[in-house]
Image (tube, rainbow, N blue to C red):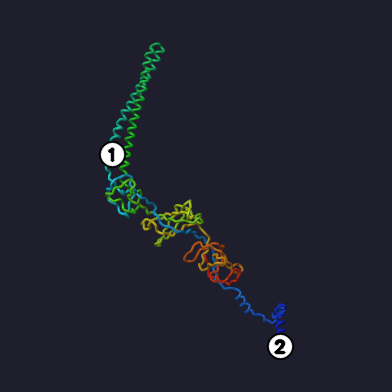
Amino acid sequence: MRLFPILTALLVLSVLYVIVFQREALRTWSAREIIPATSEQISAEKAIETTAVVALRSSQSMREQFVVISGTTEANRQVVMRAETRGVIISNPLRKGTSVQEDDVLCRIDPGTRLISLSEAEAALIEAESRLPAATARVREAESRLTEAALNLNVARRLAEDGFASESRIAAAEASTESAKAGVKAAQSQLKGAQAGVQTARTRVAVAEKEIKKLEIRAPFSGQLESDTAEIGSLLQSGDYCATIIQLNPIKLVGFIVETDIGKVKVGAKTRARLATGQVVTGHVTFLSRAADPDTRTFRVEAIVSNPDRAIRDGQTAEIAIAAGQLAVHLIPQSALTLNDDGKLGVRLITGIGTAMFQPVKIENDSQDGVFISGLDDTADIIVVGQEYVSDGVMVDPTYQGVGN
């Protein structure tokens, strides 16, 4: 056996023993041999332990909160005008796009014999009314005879009590009274018949007049024709189409709000909408549905917008922003937003001891200057550059770029 391999093995075992079992003694011995660090070296080590970042000292401000939804424009009023009676159209058609005023004639139907029927009904009414005076006079005459008969009966009874009148005279007076009563009833019955005749004649006149009014189909409100009116010479049956009229001033904005935001919106709230054409219009909420759509669980909302030149058309796409009250927010660059390990959106703040800390936030709105977020204190030091290179608890060396609002 050679001596050199044995010595090498013993040396290796000795080194391993010192490293494993005498570690603390070895560290103490090594520390005695280290040269003390200079102040420049200490500063350099500290610089290595902290991370340089750029921060924004932000203060919150009150800003109008908006609920933004997608929607469409819708005519304020729209109705399909239909015929209520049968007849041939005798008016020239109005073309679609024509502006009409309330009560303008859209379609006129040939009256046929309806004017004659009205004349006959009016004549019958005059005749029935002429019978009323005579019937009324007969009632008054019968009532006078009854009064006279009752007086004669009273006189006869008094004379009979004094012995100056016979029983036959009393009986005759009573018979005259009963006859007078029957005459009054007959006269009253004739008067009621005459009055019923007048009422019947008036009803016939009203029916004839209403039938004539149906001959002219008029616009119920001012607006525009969405289609041509019925062509001259065409035969309309009751219920047949005459015209469609819509009202575009004002015009409605219609959209649907999710149930989590419906509590933020109230009737009368201001609205601002951007149309697909780029046009921006303002208005106010006029309707909030109390019942959710069973399929989407959203609530219908309507707003009214002025449209004097009728430039906004029915059915245009619109992005609608509805005012939902004041909210405390911070304005920060969008690049300052980051995600934590759980995927939550937030920002990294500088704590009072100079370390980084993640804080979840909520984006409330955006603008050309950045995004408005909520979820922070009144003032906050927000890391806007370098937030992706630090984690919670890491010491940072911030450089402040300005004050946010």
Res 210 → quadrant: top left
Residue depicted at x 29% and y 32%: 127
Q: CA distance from mark 2 to mark 1?
A: 144 Å
Image quadrant in which the N terminus is located: bottom right
Residue depicted at x 28% and y 35%: 123
Residue depicted at x 37% and y 55%: 308
Q: Nearer the viewer, residue 72 or 292?
A: 292
Q: x, y (%) of residue 32? A: 70, 81
Q: x, y (%) of residue 373? A: 52, 63
Residue named by callout 2 = 4
Q: Check residue 229 in the rendering and tell me which mark sits there, or answer none.
A: none
Q: x, y (%) of residue 228? A: 31, 53
Residue depicted at x 32% and y 32%: 197
Q: Amino acid at mark 1?
A: Ser
- Could you tell me if residue 276 is visible in this image? yes
- Label 1 crowd (10 A; few <14 / some 14-19 / many >=20): some
Q: x, y (%) of residue 277? A: 39, 62
Labels in figure, total: 2
Q: Earlier in the sequence, mark 2 or mark 1?
A: 2
Left or right position of 90 against 293:
left
